[in-house]
Image (tube, grey):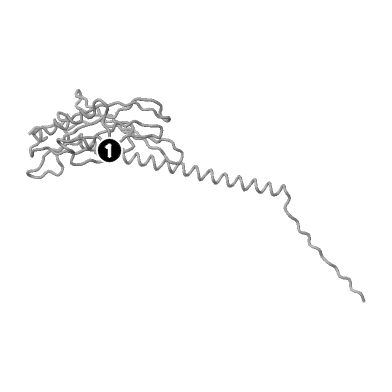
Amino acid sequence: MIQKKYIIKKKYKGMTLIEVLFSTAIFSFVAITLFALFKLGQTYWSKGIAYNTLQAEGKRILTLLQQDIKESDINKDSGYTYTTSVSNIFVGSQNVSRDGLLLSVPNPNYRAGGHPVIYRAYIATSEKNDNQGGPGSLYLLEFNPTSATGYDLTWSNIDSNLRRLFDPDGFSKDELNRLNNPSPIKVSLLSNNLFSFRANINSNTNTIGISVVLMRKSFSDQKLQSVRFELEIAPANNSQFPFNN
């Protein structure tokens, strides 16, 4: 008896060219979307870092200025003005202030036989901004009187030295080492993202106005972030101040 054998053939079906192209298009769209979201997140993260850095620096600067101005004697405060021309592809061409401010304040670490007052100078450097943002710097210089009472020529000497360095070309970083007779006992860098620093002593209202603009480039999109801080405060200028005793 002859048995019939049936052979079952399986049919294997592959992907057509249209299906391959369609799948590739979907994959490309998903990849591009994910990359765009990643790039956007990186950009906002970079901007946030730059903005938070400027905010922290600005708040620190204003906190120090507010405390020192409030405790100072406006009769022993001195301001130095300097304006530099800035040309920047982000902000255009404009004139910005890079001023200085010398304050006489009570010594927070005063001990008997020590100095009842110290002198603090907030100095903006005159370096110009460039197309990279190239901000200047803001320094805090601290000086001691040369006598225990504070009634000496220290303040006048400091004032004369700073005024000489500001005129006519402004205060550059390398001039920190040229300050002498007296030399600062402490130099602190408050910010190297300074765009503008304006200090105005108003003798009519006995107030000091401060305007600080900080600027920093975010590394992802190379755009500048900027913050502005304003302050106006009246110095103590009272009979309890050591200069008036």
Q: Quadrant of the N terminus?
A: bottom right
Which residue is most to the right? 1
Q: Quadrant of residue 168?
A: top left
Which residue is most to the top? 204
- Residue found at x 34% / y 39%: 55
The total of numbered circles placed on residues is: 1
Q: Quadrant of residue 58?
A: top left
Q: Nearer the viewer, residue 140 or 169?
A: 169
**Residue behind mark 1:** 61
- Residue found at x 76% / y 59%: 12
Residue 68: % across, % down: 20, 36
Q: Quadrant of the C terminus?
A: top left
Q: Is residue 3 above or below residue 79?
A: below
Residue 30: % across, % down: 59, 47
Q: Is residue 198 above or below residue 18?
A: above
Label 1 sits on what residue type?
Ile
Instruction: For label 1, count other residues whose C-alpha is less than 10 Å away and answer few (under 14), some (14-19) or many (20+).
Output: some
- Residue found at x 69% / y 49%: 20
User: In the visual, does 120 lie left or right of 147?
Assistant: right
Q: Is residue 14 above or below residue 131?
A: below
Residue 147: % across, % down: 8, 38
Residue 196: % across, % down: 32, 31
At numbered mark 1, what does the secondary structure look like: helix, strand or loop? helix
User: In the visual, does 142 lie left or right of 192?
Assistant: left
User: In the visual, does 242 lie left or right of 210?
Assistant: left
